[in-house]
Image (cartoon, rainbow, N blue to C red):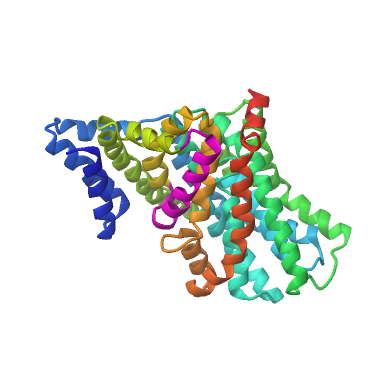
Amino acid sequence: MNGIEVVGLFLLLLALSVPLSVSMGIAGIAYIVISGIPISVIAQRMGNGVNSFPLLAVPVFIFAGCLLNTSGITTRIFDFAKRLIGPIRGGLAQVNVIASLIFSGISGAALADIGGLGQIEIKAMEEQGYKLESAAAITAASATIGPIFPPSIPLIIYGTVAEVSGVKLLIAGVIPGLLITLLLMLQIGYFARKYSFPAESRAYNVKEVFNAFRKALPALLAPVILVGGLLSGFFSPTEVAAVTVFYGLILGKFVYKELTWQQLAEVGRQSIRQTANIMFIISSAAIFAFALTVEQVHVQMADMLLGISKNPVILLLIVNLLLLVVGMIMETIAAILVLTPLLVPALSQAGVDPIHLGIVMVLNLMIGLLTPPVGMSLYMVSIVSGAPIEKVIRAVLPYFLPLILSLIIVTLFPKISIWLPGLLF
């Protein structure tokens, strides 16, 4: 059984609607059995796939995201941002983006952003006069900031697979994350004038803004402490995740006093379920990657890409097209685990920095979260808002413009990704 047959079996299983993790596992196990490799390799590879210190950050960040959703942090972040913007036309839509940027500095995941802030944001926007599907679309689009701006679960997983510094990757996401925020806010500002988005009925006085700021200050300090710890080199990604949990517990239990022991137990159950899903995907991908590595598929991929061109810009554009298609049909973490071992060696030979490639790859796949049929952000925001999925898809289409523009800028100008980690390290 050669590499092409392994990939072919994997694609066939996908076409038969077999789950991605199972498809990868079956393809890898079939290769091991047919090739006469000892069966013990299966357990060994699955165990080694998840036996990684950087991956400890993943379950801890999942726990942190669930914890922050139930500890009063999200409500206070949104309330302060709303009062700060005031009666600007389309102000709540802008608050949506700003709140996503702040919350992304805590949760590290798009779906955590939608689950944590989405319900609050969409309800407030609908009450102010926004169409339900429009509020849902803005929420889904702004949630793409989460996995780019540090901390980021997808970037941590990419760094583990690509064997590059997780800290450098997370720091590399700072400027691209701010770029996406800026472009989304510019488009919303344009739409607010063109389509007469609603505005707050009154301006908040200084006292009201200050009171909201005072209540939100402990929550606002969380991303400052965490991102500052990364930038200073004081925290590793895994340590950042642990500090996030500790800080969330302090805020929820002793500062805001909204976290109960029953809620904490439920947070633990949610985290265990989500972590089990991700770790099963990672362990299945380890078997699949083993088969591809033995058959030198990554070398064949490198030869194929370098045979097309050795220009790094052209290769990145080709990879962008590939990833945009993959993002439509493949879950983010599975796509990272399957494609990273194939793409990193090829593009590294052409002179592409693996840090830059990681940002480009994750940004691509975050756009994929907004594209059917496997657009998890679309389904999540549809569930949270109650808006029909087809209306959400139509409403989110205009917001592809700032996201694609961000992707093009980040792709063509590598310094946007690698300047900050290069400056600090």
Q: Is residue 127 left or right of residue 147?
A: right
In the rendered image of this protein, does residue 72 appear above or below residue 37? Answer: below
**Span colored in magenta:** 309-332
Quadrant housing the N terminus:
top left
Q: Is residue 114 left or right of residue 17?
A: right
Chief secondary structure of the magenta span? Answer: helix
Viewer-side residue, 38 vs 254: 38
Can residue 19 be found in the magenta stretch? Answer: no
Task: Please state the horizontal and vertical placement of residue 221, each as a whole percent of the image.
Answer: 70, 42
In the rendered image of this protein, does residue 212 appear above or below residue 423? Answer: below
Q: Quadrant of residue 239?
A: top right
Task: Please state the horizontal and vertical placement of residue 414, each as a whole percent of the image.
Answer: 61, 36
Q: Residue at x 49, y 28 (%)?
A: 164
Q: Residue at x 31, y 30 (%)?
A: 48
In the rendered image of this protein, does residue 36 appear above or below residue 216? Answer: above
Q: Residue at x 58, y 44 (%)?
A: 148
Q: Quadrant of residue 396?
A: bottom right
Task: Please state the horizontal and vertical placement of residue 272, each as a whole percent of the image.
Answer: 39, 47
- Residue that lies at the very extreme toward the right in this rendered image: 206
Residue 79 in view in this figure: no
Q: Is residue 301 left or right of residue 386?
A: left
